[in-house]
Image: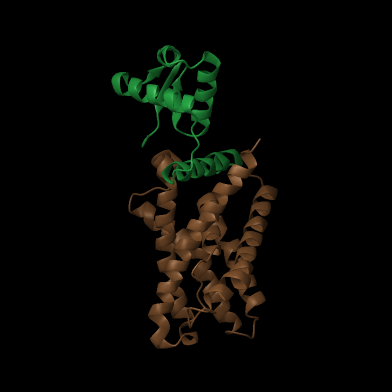
Chain colours: A green, B brown
Amino acid sequence: MNSLKALAELSQIVHGMERDLGLTNLSDPDKRVLLSIVRETQEHGTAKTRNVVNICMEQGVSRPTIFRSLKALTNMGHIEQVQHGNYRVLAEN
Amino acid sequence: MGRLQSIKIDVFTILCFVGAWIFVTLVIFPLQSRFLMFADVASLLFLPHGVRILATWLTGARAIVPLTLAEALAASIIWGWDGLQSQWTILAASVVGGSSAFITFRLFLLAGISCTAKDHGMRLWRVLLLVALGASIINSLGKAIVLGEVFNPMDTTKVIATFIIGDVLGAASCLMLMLFAFRHLQRP
């Protein structure tokens, strides 16, 4: 296992523990973005960024904040980008 | 992985293992000695077991040699070569400890359970705790055979139970320490 892969997997262990032990600190916009992705994924299999932005902007979340949340949620291992402009929720969310 | 990097990882593994063992001896043992008669043999929070699991998970069979050396080194520092047992007994016990995690990972693989983030995602840490339990059972039974004459036969079951509890709690604590280390490093 190379160093970067090892670090990524260790990071995934840490994020899994944080989530399972309730130690994640999701902000309100993060939760709204995650929830919209969960709903979109349930309906369409993946969540299009355009739809997530529309849903969240209707709830008063600004566009830059939505993209910051998408990046944060990806780093925390809650979601992943399956192809350009499409996200999906990772297992157990 | 380059040769130099592999050597660095081996040295890091040895330092972590010996450091964790010394911490257990100097801090955990005195705290639990008030409650258990065999506190000088089995710890209720054996952090080095977490090092065993993570090192073997990261480097596979390569971890056996540094873990064995680390265990022999820690045992010789703490007990002395002439202290608890003969040199060969300490070496045999170290080989059991150093290879227990690798054997467990192989058994899991034979049972169709791979231990990768790709297969388990966010649940990987739970699988690693299961591996810690399996490795602890193998390690405890192996150590009980190798170090059998050290324990009072009446206490062997209690000692093995303490080994297993200590190993699993130690591995869980090690993962928690890693979690807080990651959080600290990610702090802006």
**x and y, in percent, of residue A63 in the image:** 52, 14
Name which residue lies at 41% across and 50% down. B126
Work out which residue is located at the far front of the displayed protein and give it: A60
**x and y, in percent, of residue B129 in the image:** 43, 55
Work out which residue is located at the far left of the displayed protein and give it: A43
Name which residue lies at 63% across and 59% down. B16
Residue B75, quarter of picture: bottom right
Seen in the image, is B31 located left or right of residue B122? right
The correct choice, above or below, for B151 with respect to A74 in the image is: below
The correct choice, above or below, for B39 with respect to A35 in the image is: below
**x and y, in percent, of residue B121 in the image:** 42, 39
Name the image quarter holding the C terminus of chain B. top right
Name which residue lies at 40% across and 67% down. B137
The correct choice, above or below, for A81 with respect to A2 in the image is: above
**x and y, in percent, of residue B154 in the image:** 39, 87
Name the image quarter holding the N terminus of chain B. top right
Seen in the image, is A43 located left or right of residue B52? left
Residue B187, quarter of picture: top right
How many marks are shown on the rendered structure?
A: 0
Question: Is residue B84 in sight in this rendering?
Answer: yes
B180 or B1, which lies in front?
B180
B9 or A9, which lies in front?
A9
Question: Is residue B60 in sight in this rendering?
Answer: no
A52 or B116, which lies in front?
A52
Residue A5, quarter of picture: top right
